[in-house]
Image (cartoon, rainbow, N blue to C red):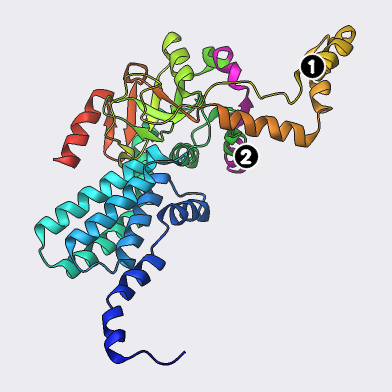
Amino acid sequence: MGKPKSGRSRSSSPAKPAATAAAKAMDVLAYFEQTLASSPDMTPPIAAIKTLVELVRQSSATTLSELLSALSAAIERLNTGHKHSIPASAGCTLFNRFAMKSFAKDQNFERTKLTLVARGNDFVDSVDSFREKIATVGNQFIQDDAVILIHSYSRVVMRLLQRAAAENKRFTVYVTESRPTDSGARAVESLRKRGIPAHLILDSAVGYVMDKVDLVLVGAEGVVETGGILNQIGTYQMAMVAREKKTPFYAVTESYKFVRMFPLDQYDLGIDVPILADPAMPDWDAAAAAAAACAPSVPHSPTEAAHRVSDMSVAARHAIVEEMARTNPALDYTPPQYITLLITEKGVLTPSAVSDELIKVFL
């Protein structure tokens, strides 16, 4: 092909920057998930903030309107369509609020962009100091010879327990297995490495052990306006048992997880709730025939039953667990009346004080 005439070259040039920008558009969800996977200590709200900081840094926007439009689209993407959408929304709301305040204070667009990136990175880097403050605040609630029940694996709960152990406090920890993620096993391993007596218990054994427990410590994926918390499935029933047994139930969480939500019940979380269902059998007739064939040899003890389960192929067990994770909710909502106190880097809060803290942030 011959070279285009200079006039044609000029007339087609305005389309090139838009095409280039579209080609280089940042995949915010991919960056968010990569950020989460890159560090075991990274939480979804902080990963969301880090993603938005990177979006601003990469942005070629030349006006405030363009940048805010890009931020709005990115926030909408991060707030929907993935399993971390609710905790991510806390980080998105916090960053968006800071961005709006920054641009209102300083009309210099380029300077404010640089400020947003610098302050955002500073906030991400300060996360560890939040956990240290919480460990300092919460240490007073752990006494010598205490028996503590925790659920799942919470980074900030781990930090609190490690601080108490470092101060030579003697205590024992029961940890729920926390299905379907089995994150309780990770918590037990982490505690034992630091010389803290820790025992893994069945999720269904919470009521059984509660009489031995002096206090319950749980983390939170989000703290809502009611003063209640969103956390890994199983937290709500643990809180109900604790209240029935008059056992203190403490939510240990960073204030950046406060979310502007006001749920009324488990099904008012603004996300699609998976349908609770048993793992599907590929052939019910074959399953019925197999059950009938096994009828004479019903297991007579838990040990015998366990051996039966162990005969199932690893692939089959893995498929069932994956199906459970897909069809069951990942989070539940614990209403404020079940929570004794919230332990945060801002101090110890009653559930009713959460709305006051949110007002301070968003007004």
- Counting from the top left corner in percent of width and height, residue 28 is at 40, 55
Query: Residue 189: which disc?
Result: 2
Magenta-colored span? 188-208
**In this view of the protein, can residue 174 be seen by the observer?**
no
Looking at the figure, which quarter contains the C terminus?
A: top left
- Counting from the top left corner in percent of width and height, residue 138 is at 37, 34
Disc on the earlier residue, 1 or 2: 2
Instruction: Answer few, some or many: residues within 10 Å of disc 1's Cα (few below 14, many 20 plus, some between 14 and 19).
Output: few
In depth, the one of 190 and 107 nearer the eye is 107
Query: Residue 339: which disc?
Result: none
In depth, the one of 322 and 353 nearer the eye is 322
Query: Residue 285: which disc?
Result: 1
**Amino acid type of the residue tagged 2 in the rendering:** Glu
- Counting from the top left corner in percent of width and height, residue 115 is at 22, 64
**In this view of the protein, can residue 200 be seen by the observer?**
yes
Q: Give the Cα separation between the discs numbered 1 and 2.
A: 43 Å
Task: Report the side of 130 relative to 323 (left or right).
Answer: left
**Amino acid type of the residue tagged 1 in the rendering:** Asp
Inspect the magenta stretch and tell me whether residue 193 lies in it: yes
Q: Kindly state the secondary structure of the residue where label 2 is placed.
A: helix
Task: Report the side of 175 relative to 135 (left or right).
Answer: right
